[in-house]
Amino acid sequence: IFFYALQVARKSLASFHNNQNSSSAHQRQRRLRMSKSLASLLASTLAGVINVLLTNPMWVASLRIMEYKSIRKNSNETSNSNSSESNINHQQTNLWNVMRRIAKEEGLLQLWNATFTSLLLVSNPIIQHFLYGQMRIRLLSYIG
């Protein structure tokens, strides 16, 4: 998702930049030009945010499934009885059903629980991607 969103963000920023250049000369002088590195950083940031917003519900549901399986395993080890909690149907623990159940029972916004923390963690791959691009450009200009 990240790389698809990155390509879309790059194309959108390039289109926006081209639309600014098609305006009058006076307007072009007044507007600051966006450098390629700044555009790359902005595109990476947008892609990271889109990635987090689209995948966070799946991570929340995935963590719930792991929690359910852990509870089921622990309850099976401590007792041999078939309690309703330890007898979770496998069909109920697939990703989409868990997401649906969370949205229904706890509210739709619960699927984006801890999104702020994930958005903070987006900064690491953004910086890495940005630095990779800068080093690649400098290396290619040095070689070529």
Image: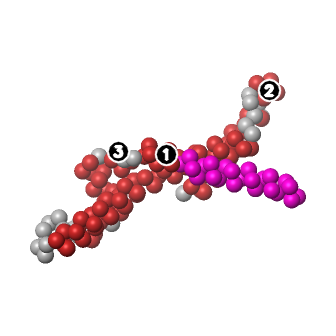
Report the disc number at residue 29.
2
Is 3 colored magenta in this rendering?
no
Q: Main secondary structure of the magenta part?
A: helix
Q: Which tag is nearer the camera, tag 1 or tag 2?
A: 1
Picture coordinates of residue 72 (x, y %)? 23, 68
- Where are the magenta residues, as a range? 122-144
Q: Is residue 124 magenta?
A: yes
Q: Secondary structure at mark 2?
A: helix
Q: Is residue 53 left or right of residue 22?
A: left
Q: Are marks 1 and 3 in contact (CB under 8 Å)?
A: no
For disc 3, the neighbor class at 10 Å (few under 14, some 14 to 19, many from 20) is few
Which x, y percent locates residue 104? Answer: 27, 51
Report the Cα–Cα distance between label 1 and label 3: 16 Å
Q: Position of residue 71 (x, y in %)?
A: 24, 65
Disc 2 crowd rating (10 Å Cα; few below 14, some 14-19, many 20+) is few
Residue that label 1 marks = 119
